[in-house]
Amino acid sequence: MGLINTNRVFNWFRDSENKKFTLVLLVLFCLLLEETIHLYWGIELAYTHVFYILLVLAAIWYHQRAVFLAIVLGVMHIIVSYEILGELTWPPLLRAMMFILVTAIVAVISATKDEYQKEFIQSKKVIEENHEILISYITECANRLRHPIEIVHDNLRELEKQVEQEGPPGDLKIRLQLQIKNTEQIIANLQDLNGAIVTDDKEIPEAYREFISR
Amino acid sequence: MNQVLIETVTGDISRGKNLVLRLTTADRLKQDNIDIVKTMADKGYRVIVITTNQPAEVLKKNYEKSGIDIAKLFFIDAITSYAIGTTPAAEQNVRFISNPSNLTDLGIAITGALNESEDKDPCILFDSISTMLIYLPSASISKFIHYISNRLRLIDTPGVFLAVGKGLDPMMISNLSTFMDDIILPDVV
């Protein structure tokens, strides 16, 4: 049950509109905190931790662009502090710098992770496509080699049976000629396969080509 | 004669399922061919036998042995010229194609035979899809069968396509099944 709910929340956040909506709500909430707790009540500790929820989420979702938000929040925090105290002090400056630093770190990590994930999905897709191509190729080889050999074999077996039971039929020559032609075509099909392996036929992925031609 | 097969084929055609793929076994291919041709000829159809498997000369002997009147048949032989290396002397009711992979000529010959037989109630027997795999990639065969089946459907003409079931990969059978009205599996004997 808990897992289902977590998944539902996770899926909800996949929608870019929902992400924007969440960030706008958090921005409004942070402005409210700055206005009431800091400016109105004059408390400048603890409430700024809430800013990190906004900044971390923004950094995860929008990477380096979230740093601008951190700068805006930091500057706003410094201005409000200046309004209250009438002078510029170190604590709000440090807090503003921490906003920017934490956001930048999360943004870089998140961007790198997303880049790896993208590459991983891309390479998985390429592997799957290559695998599919190989399966089609092997199937076609089986179609054009194994089955024709079976046909020639069956035709010759039938001819043998007929010769045994009734003696050589009048059309023996043409039937043998046909089987010779069939075997010639099978050899040509085999040469096509070899050609495809030796040349740079893009239908066969390089690793598989190397494997088949061992 | 394989009565079950014959009843299935004739039943399909009488119900308007004109295009039938018969998946058979290698040892039954020849007999299935004879049974279907005999039944269709007896029903008054002019059977157009398209062969890529056995020369028309061999098929004619098999049919005569089984009591089929070969005057009611028309052959499109895509294998004899290829096997002997020259074009055989012209024969009545036989059209020779230079090579089984020459699908253009094969298509023209089939269309011509259907047009000529328009008032004679034609039907087609294709022997066999599996043999064509020796000469052509499966994709080309599927396209060609699609073309022929569409042609037959347009003129409301029955067609039975033979293939050795074991030799066709499932993807190809699946492709072919989309063009056909019914598939008769090898266990129908």
Image: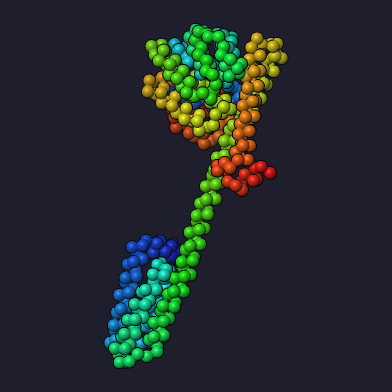
Q: Measuring from the top left, give residue B78's x and y in whole percent.
A: 54, 19
Residue at 70% across / 14% down in the picture? Answer: A163
Say if A12 sits above or below A204 in the image: below
Q: In the shown orientation, is residue A24 left or right of residue B89?
A: left
Say if B98 sits above or below A89 in the image: above
Residue at 48% across / 59% down in the picture? Answer: A118
Q: Measuring from the top left, give residue A177's x and y in whole percent.
A: 64, 18
**Screen quadrant of the N terminus of chain B:** top right
Q: Measuring from the top left, give residue B162's x and y in whole percent.
A: 53, 23
Q: Measuring from the top left, give residue A211's x and y in whole percent.
A: 65, 45
Which corner quadrant of the image does residue A63 belong to?
bottom left
Q: In the shown orientation, is residue A119 left or right of residue B134?
A: left
Residue at 55% across / 26% down in the picture? Answer: B132
Residue at 49% across / 10% down in the picture? Answer: B93
Find the residue positioned furthest to the bottom: A86
- Examine the rendering and report whether any part of residue A67 can be seen: yes
Which corner quadrant of the image does residue B146 belong to?
top left
